[in-house]
Amino acid sequence: MALNDVRPVNPSDVPCGRFRAEAGATAILAGEPVKIGGTGSNYVVPLADAEPTTSADIMGIASSNSTQTATADGYVDVWLADPSVEWSAKAESAAAVDTEAEILGLLNDIVAFNLAAGVYTVATGSAASTNGLRITGGNASQGTVTFRILNQASSLNT
């Protein structure tokens, strides 16, 4: 996995919570999206590719690295998936957002994360009404998009 894949645009505006990370589970790095999972759904785990969706919701974005080991549970601090917070991440394809006109064409598209080679990006080419991220803008020179997590895809809404 990669560090700082996803970041809040204004970190001081984001509510945060602490969650358990299961012993022996995949380490969670700061900047990775997480959902409820693990044994008995008592933990957070990394989001899978093509999530969040309205049926596979998101708890938030890790704001710290998880502390679990192979034999002991740990914890991870998480910026909560508050729909009022704006986030930033690289687009799956930099070529899809390398002009302002292309970014304007993506505004309000409903998309999900792409997970490839351990890196989370925003899948700009996979708009579907059941996805959980709404594109709000971007930065053509950096190859990033900004987005909000939809209320119906947030664990805070369930």
Image (cartoon, rainbow, N blue to C red):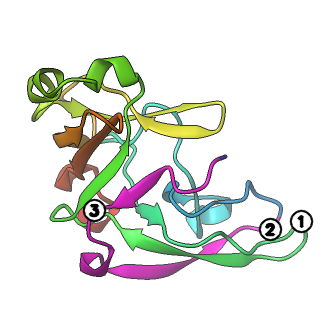
Name of the residue lying farthest toward the right: 71
First of labels 2, 3 by sequence position = 3
Image vertical order of residue 137 relative to residue 23, above or below = above
| Segment colored magenta | 2-23
**What amino acid is at disc 2?**
Ala
Identify which residue is drawn at 51% across, 40% down: 120
Q: Spot the residue most to the front.
A: 141
The quadrant in which residue 130 appears is top left
- Please state which amino acid type lies under the numbered disc 1: Ala
Q: Is residue 21 magenta?
A: yes
Q: Which residue is mark 3?
A: 9
Residue on which disc 1 sits: 70
Element marked by disc 1: loop
Find disc 2 in the rendering and name its residue.
Answer: 23
The quarter of the picture where the C terminus appears is bottom left
Callout in the foreground (2, 3): 3
Please say whether residue 125 is visible from this viewpoint.
no
> Which residue occupies the foreground of this view, 3 or 21?
3
